[in-house]
Image (cartoon, grey):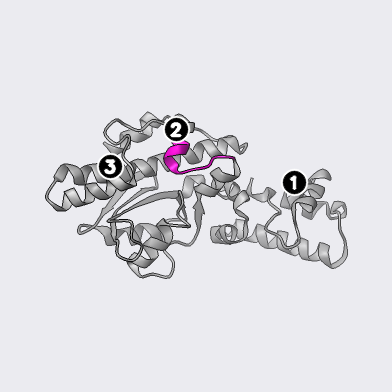
């Protein structure tokens, strides 16, 4: 899947991409083995083939950040498909809606098959170890919120090396709105104890927790974990819609991880 992308190569727009595919050139390897079928010549062909070789080198070396930085968002599903088993899904809850005054309250991560929570005043800094271990971080709307918020909160220049924002994969497939709106369209149901909670209520849960409400603390953590599980479930279904022959999990089974 990832080796079928040409749109990250300079000078390859939709028309040239279609021309390549029209000649049966649907992968980097095919372009290298059938140079004579490439529909342009001279320096442009040489530059194109150099870019193909660079892409193959990055694939062989598992330089995932090369692809997240160079692929247009319409092609990020290819990255997610290639490295899905290595992906770390994260979600962040904050203490309010102010970008400058608010802090991180909870971070949840589905990392290497296990579900983790990182909680303010307890183990929040441990998230940095998780982020360092992650080969690919996947979020929903992380480009606009989660990633820059975490970088400011932890005062680091980059919280992860490679990141895919699921929101834009969904957008290119015709799914608009937030994570929960897409969940409903895909008929994904959360467990009853976290169903219906949104970001505004998550802030209220945080302040109830500060006043000593242990149940509010636990509900907030479970809600954040629920967002992570949902992000993975939506990702599986978006890949399936993109033509990937991937397994789609049963939501009930994954949500059992929350407890």
The answer to which of marks 3 and 1 sits earlier in the sequence is: 1
Mark 2 or mark 1: name the one nearer the start of the chain.
Answer: 1
Instruction: For marks 2 and 3, give the one nearer the viewer.
Output: 2
What residue lies at 49% left-to-right and 41% top-to-bottom?
A: 235
Q: Quadrant of residue 189?
A: top left
Nearest-to-viewer mark from 2 and 1: 2
Most foreground residue, 221 or 200:
200
Q: Which residue is mark 1?
A: 26
Local secondary structure at mark 1: loop
Judge whether 179 appears above or below 97 on screen.
above
| In the foreground, 164 or 135 | 164
Q: CA distance from mark 3 to mark 1?
A: 43 Å
Q: Residue at x 82, y 49 (%)?
A: 19
Q: Residues within 10 Å of mark 2 (few under 14, many from 20)?
A: few
The front one of 188 and 1 is: 188
Rendered view: 199 above or below 52: above
- Please tell me which of labels 2 and 3 falls first in the chain: 2
Q: Which residues are magenta?
A: 174-183
Residue 178 counted in the magenta span: yes
Q: Which residue is mark 2?
A: 184
Q: Which mark is residue 222?
A: 3
Quick check: can you spot residue 83? no
Quarter that holds the C terminus: top left
Give the CA distance from mark 2 to mark 3: 19 Å
**From where the camera sits, is residue 6 visible?**
yes
Direction left: furthest residue: 212
Asked if the residue at tag 1 contacts the one at tag 2, i.e. Cβ–Cβ closer than 8 Å, the answer is no
| Disc 3: CA contacts within 10 A as few (<14), some (14-19) or many (>=20) | many
Judge left or right: residue 161 versus residue 259. right
Q: Position of residue 224 (x, y in %)?
A: 32, 46
Q: Position of residue 127 (x, y in %)?
A: 32, 58
């Amino acid at each position: 899947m990832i080796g079928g992308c040409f749109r990250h190569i300079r000078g390859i727009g939709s028309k040239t991409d279609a021309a390549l595919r029209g000649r049966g050139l649907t992968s980097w390897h095919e372009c290298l083995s059938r140079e004579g079928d490439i529909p342009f010549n001279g320096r442009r062909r040489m530059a194109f083939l150099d870019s193909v070789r660079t892409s193959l080198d990055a694939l062989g070396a598992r330089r995932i950040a090369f692809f997240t930085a160079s692929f247009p968002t319409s092609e990020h599903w290819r990255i997610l498909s290639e490295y899905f088993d290595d992906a770390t899904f994260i979600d962040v809850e904050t203490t309010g809606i102010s970008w400058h005054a608010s802090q991180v309250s909870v971070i949840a991560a589905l990392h290497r098959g296990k579900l983790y929570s990182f909680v303010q005043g307890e183990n929040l800094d441990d998230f940095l170890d998780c982020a360092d271990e992650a080969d690919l971080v996947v979020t929903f709307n992380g480009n606009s919120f989660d990633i820059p918020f975490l970088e400011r909160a932890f005062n680091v220049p980059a919280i992860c090396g490679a990141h895919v924002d699921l929101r834009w994969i969904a957008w290119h497939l015709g799914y608009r709105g937030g994570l929960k709106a897409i969940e409903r369209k895909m008929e994904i149901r959360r467990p009853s104890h976290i169903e219906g909670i949104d970001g505004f209520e998550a802030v209220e849960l945080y302040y109830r927790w500060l006043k000593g409400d242990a149940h509010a603390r636990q509900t907030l953590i479970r809600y954040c974990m629920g967002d992570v599980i949902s992000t993975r479930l939506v990702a599986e279904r978006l890949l399936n819609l993109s033509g990937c022959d991937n397994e789609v999990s049963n939501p009930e089974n994954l949500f059992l991880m929350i407890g």
